[in-house]
């Protein structure tokens, strides 16, 4: 049987858009002759929905969206992530769920067993963990359907596992011939290497192939890298989807193992092409570009404005913005004061010219002097200190926000993680903006 891995970029709460994308990928999979197409965790909703899950109408909309998908499934099986209600009298009100759909019918539902409550995850807040692990029967084969964290409860990646059960092991005991894991696993430096170690261990240990389908794209402060992959029963990676972009892989499941289906429509990297030790800087750069693009567009903005200082932080932010949105969608503004060096102006202009973006020069000397005159009574006889320095930053912040209000541009702030960690920034000044692009990147 042919299986497609649909690595898509959903938007939280954009049900109509998400359904349209899911149906489009289903149609492409059908054209490839696929028997099954698999989508990421909670892709109908978009991950992470957070406290939107506490709004009953939001959950209802997700279930209606699932119905729309179901009614478009003909001649192919689909595994899709959604949010289901817990109809039991006790427990949390929701399940993190996967539906197996075929010919306009929901054949079976499968619920997440292990709920992460560390780092950026707080799933125990909303979801009830399942204790009933069942198989999905597809084309006469027994599929174990796991959801993200369900594969992470192994000691091969943790010095001490925090879970007392192993869902994958339970699936194997029930005769699973292949394991599917649908995920919304966010990007961090080195994350893919950890995933590979964990997933290949499952396949090799249990001698079954494993299909891993991850969400891609940026939602709020999280970036999902995709990197969906297929591993054969020997623990060898057969193929891997592109990182930081949507993709659709096609593989063949035959004689209890998987192999790559080569066709001109399939974006496939064979095992020999996969570099396990990822280039960290390149991955971070791609993550920042995709995260910026998705945050700006999913928030409904089309253009951004950046304060250019002539320094490296604003330069890096501007480069990322241009790569993410295009040069015609980025405006640079340099705001010199009487304390600014000539280099801050000339370097900003050179940067703007090299990137091909617009650059406005708005001197702030007169505004600063007006502030100082207004405050002269209360500041009299007090020495010049950080107050006056911060005042300049706050003037610049107000100018950028005024441009944002007038033109509808999102302000991108330029502070890095090292500055934010020690408080080397100005409230209502260089912290003004809609997205702090490099705020998780240390100065080093």
Image: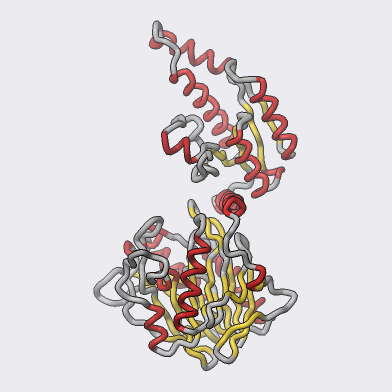
Q: Quadrant of residue 267?
A: bottom right
The location of residue 306, given as percent across then percent down, is: 60, 36
Q: Is residue 378 above or below residue 336?
A: above
Residue found 30% across the figure and 73% down from its top:
164
Question: Which residue occupies the foreground of this view, 331 or 207?
Answer: 207
Number of on-image labels: 0
* In front of the other: 201 or 391: 201
Query: Could you tell whether 357 is left or right of 39 in the image?
Result: right
Q: Residue at x 60, y 74 (%)?
A: 23
Percent across and percent down for residue 439 are: 50, 42
Q: Is residue 69 visible?
A: no
- Residue 376 x, y percent position in the rendering: 44, 9
Residue 362 % position (x, y) = 64, 24
In the displayed structure, does residue 334 sit left or right of residue 91?
right
Q: Quadrant of the N terminus?
A: bottom right
Give the farthest residue toward the left: 90
User: From the viewer's perspective, is 257 left or right of 385?
Assistant: right
Query: Compared to 226, does 407 lie above or below?
Result: above
* One can see residue 177 in this view: yes
Q: Is the image coloured rainbow, by chain, by secondary structure, or in one colour?
A: secondary structure
Which residue is rendered at x = 71% and y = 79% of the image? 262
The reply, left or right, for residue 273 in relation to residue 96 is right
Q: Nearer the viewer, residue 222 or 373?
A: 222
The furthest residue to the top = 381
Relative to 289, residue 19 above or below: below
Point 53% across, 30% down: residue: 397
């Amino acid at each position: 049987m042919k299986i497609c891995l649909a690595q898509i970029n959903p938007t939280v709460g954009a049900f109509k858009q998400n359904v349209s994308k899911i149906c489009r990928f289903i149609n492409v999979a059908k054209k490839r002759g696929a028997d099954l197409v698999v989508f990421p965790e909670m892709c109908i909703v978009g991950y992470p929905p957070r406290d939107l899950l506490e709004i009953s109408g939001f959950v209802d909309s997700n279930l209606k969206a699932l119905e729309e998908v179901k009614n478009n499934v003909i001649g192919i099986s689909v595994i899709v992530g959604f949010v289901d209600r817990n109809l039991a009298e006790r427990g949390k009100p929701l399940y993190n769920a996967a539906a197996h759909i075929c010919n306009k019918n929901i054949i079976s539902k499968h619920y997440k067993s292990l709920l992460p409550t560390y780092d950026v995850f707080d799933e125990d807040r909303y979801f009830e963990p399942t204790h009933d692990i069942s198989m999905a029967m597809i084309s006469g084969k027994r599929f174990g359907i796991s959801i993200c964290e369900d594969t992470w409860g192994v000691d091969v990646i943790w010095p001490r596992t925090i879970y007392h059960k192993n869902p994958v092991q339970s699936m194997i005991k029930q005769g699973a011939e292949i394991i599917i894991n649908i995920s919304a696993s966010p990007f961090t430096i080195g994350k893919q290497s950890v995933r590979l170690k964990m997933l290949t261990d499952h396949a090799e240990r249990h001698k079954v192939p494993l299909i891993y389908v991850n969400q891609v794209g940026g939602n709020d402060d999280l970036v999902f890298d995709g990197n969906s992959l297929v591993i054969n029963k020997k623990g060898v990676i057969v193929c891997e989807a592109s990182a930081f972009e949507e993709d659709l892989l096609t593989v063949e499941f035959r004689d209890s193992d998987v192999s790559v289906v080569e066709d001109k429509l399939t974006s496939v990297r064979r095992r020999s092409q996969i570099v396990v030790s990822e280039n960290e800087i390149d991955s971070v750069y791609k993550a920042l570009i995709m995260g910026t693009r998705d945050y700006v567009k999913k928030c409904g903005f089309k253009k951004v404005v950046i304060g250019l200082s002539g320094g490296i932080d604003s330069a890096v932010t501007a480069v990322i913005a241009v790569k993410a949105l295009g040069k015609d969608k980025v405006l640079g503004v340099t705001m010199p004061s009487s304390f600014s060096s000539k280099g801050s102006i000339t370097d900003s202009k050179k940067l703007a010219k090299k990137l091909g973006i617009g650059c406005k020069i708005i001197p702030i000397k007169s505004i600063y002097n007006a502030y100082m005159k207004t405050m002269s009574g209360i500041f009299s006889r007090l020495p010049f200190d950080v107050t006056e320095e911060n005042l300049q930053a706050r003037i610049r912040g107000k100018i950028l926000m005024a441009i944002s209000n007038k033109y509808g541009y999102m302000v991108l702030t330029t502070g890095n993680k090292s500055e934010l960690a020690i408080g080397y920034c100005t409230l209502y000044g260089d912290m003004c903006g809609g997205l702090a692009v490099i705020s998780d990147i240390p100065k080093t």
